[in-house]
Amino acid sequence: MDSPGAQCEIVVSEGSGRVVVHFSDEEYLIFELDADTFAIDRSHASLSPFAHGGRMEVTDAFDPASGRPAVRIFIDGSVVEAFTSAGRVLSTRVYPTTPPPWRVEAPANSQHWGLAP
């Protein structure tokens, strides 16, 4: 696990696995890559009663022949955007009550880094 700031990029090269961004022990955001489905689960992304939770997903998410990573995830404060190798895009907002640094738990076939100091 690594601790990026509020702006980071996470790249998962192949289409299976799970990425968890831990804002705190009780607040976290889950990205799931399974078969040909990509999902973002924000059910536990905020302790705020005003934040919306829920899960969003796309099918036909991955194209191994594209030469692109299975998914690229960008987090910029409350904005979360994910781009899959088949051109699918998910965009959402999350409102964790815990400030950075946050922790990223990701599969061995992934990379992540901060985008701003």
Image: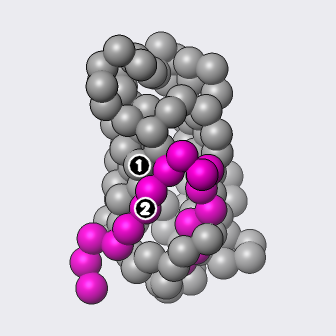
- From the viewer's perspective, is residue 91 above or below residue 116? above
Q: Tell me, yes or no, if residue 41 can be seen here.
A: no
Task: Where is residue 21? Give x, y as percent.
Answer: 57, 63
Range covered by the magenta-colored residues: 102-117
Q: Give left or right: position of 79 versus 52.
A: left
| Secondary structure under the numbered disc 2 in the rendered image | strand
Task: Where is residue 35? Give x, y as percent.
Answer: 63, 20
Going 49% across and 84% down the picture, which residue do you hit? Answer: 101
Going 50% across and 50% down the picture, which residue do you hit? Answer: 110
Q: Is residue 116 magenta?
A: yes
Going 37% across and 35% down the picture, which residue do you hit? Answer: 69
* Earlier-in-chain disc, 2 versus 1: 1
- From the viewer's perspective, is residue 54 above or below residue 37? below
Q: Tell me, yes or no, if residue 36 can be seen here.
A: yes
Observer-nearest of 105 and 55: 105
Q: Quadrant of residue 84?
A: top left
Q: Which residue is denoted by mark 1 in the rendering?
A: 11
Q: Could you classify mark 1 by the number of other residues whose Cα lies within 10 Å: few (under 14), some (14-19), or many (20 or more)?
A: many
Residue type indicated by callout 1 = Val
Q: How far apart are the two marked residues, 2 and 1, measured between alpha carbons?
A: 6 Å
**Badge number at residue 39:** none
Residue type indicated by callout 2 = His
| Secondary structure under the numbered disc 1 in the rendered image | strand
**Count of numbered marks:** 2
Observer-nearest of 6 and 70: 70
Q: Give left or right: position of 27 versus 51.
A: right
Q: Which residue is denoted by mark 2 in the rendering?
A: 112
